[in-house]
Amino acid sequence: MISTSFDTSKNDEDGPGNPVGELQEFTQKRLLKPPVYEFSSDMGPPHAREFSCSVKLGKYSEKGTGRSKKEAKRAAALAMLTHIRSLTQDGEEQAVIEEEEEEDDILLSATELRQSYTALKEGKKRVPIPAAKQNKEIQQFYNKIAKVDKKNGKIKNASLTAPSTNYCQMLQEIAEAQRFEVNYLDIEETSHSGLRQCLVQLSTLPVAVLHGSGQNIYDAHAHAAHNALQYLKLMIKS
C-alpha cells in the first residue's frame, strides 16, 4: 500500500477550502468507493496534544496530523487530494485508485441519522429530488451492481419469502460482495403499535436508509434488512 503523510499543525483548523468535502465529491463523481478515515491515539502532553488521522482510497494511504481530530482529518484529506492530482498529471486516472478494494466511512453519524429520521417523520424535511446529472450517476452505480450480480446472483436470486431466512446475514453477504457497508441504528421510541424500531443504512449511491420494526430489536433488524434487500432488487431490476 502506497502511503505518504501531510502535516498542517501550523495551519488554522478551519483553513481555506474544504479538502474533506472535495475528496468526497471526487469519489462520488467517479463512482469510486468513498475514502476511509481512521484516527490513531493522540500524542503529547495535554496542553500540546497532537492527533493523527490516516485516509485510504483504493490502494493509496495518506496521513495527516493536527491539534484536533478535525484538523488531522482535514490534513489527511488534503494530502490525498495532492496525491490524486499528481496521479492525474501522470495519466494513471481512477483505474489505479480502484485496484484495491476498500470499505467506506462516509455514512451519516448516528446523531445525524436520528435527526434526519425525526425531521422526515415530522414533515420538517423533504427528500431531495436528484438532478439529471445525479440521476445518471445513480444509474451508473446500480448498473455496476447489477453487472456484479449477474455473476453471483446474490441479489436477483435472494428469496425474500422463505421462512426462517436470516435476512441480516443475507444482506451482509451481498454488501461484502458489492463493496458497500451496512449499519443498523436502533430507535429508542416504539411505534404506535408498541413495536421496536430501527434504521439500516447502506453506503450505496446515494446512501440508502430503510426502516424496520418488530417485537424485539432483532426482529426489527431482520425487517429492516428485508426491506433493504427489496430495495436493492428494485434498483437493479431491468
Image (cartoon, grey):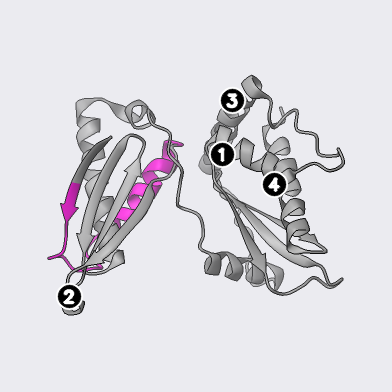
- Mark 3 vs mark 4, CA separation in Å: 20 Å
User: Tags 3 and 2 in contact by the CB under 8 Å rule?
Assistant: no
- Mark 3 vs mark 1, CA separation in Å: 16 Å
Question: Mark 1, mark 4: which one is toward the viewer?
Answer: 4
Element type at mark 3: helix
Which residue carries the number 1 mark?
Answer: 138
- Mark 2 vs mark 1, CA separation in Å: 47 Å
Q: Residue at x 74, y 44 (%)?
A: 167
Mark 2 or 1 closer to N-term? 2
Which residue carries the number 3 mark?
Answer: 148
Q: Position of residue 147 (x, y in %)?
A: 60, 24
Q: Residue lying furthest top in this view?
A: 151
> Tag 4: residue type?
Cys
Question: Mark 3, mark 4: which one is toward the viewer?
Answer: 4
Number of the label disc, if any, that sits on residue 168: 4
- Mark 3 vs mark 2, CA separation in Å: 50 Å
Q: Position of residue 117 (x, y in %)?
A: 64, 66
> Tag 2: residue type?
Pro
Which residue carries the number 2 mark?
Answer: 45
Q: Residue at x 75, y 51 (%)?
A: 222
User: Tags 1 and 4 in contact by the CB under 8 Å rule?
Assistant: no
Which region is colored magenta?
5-31
Quadrant in which residue 92 is drawn = top left
- Mark 2 vs mark 4, CA separation in Å: 44 Å
Q: Is residue 128 above or below residue 176?
A: below
Element type at mark 4: helix
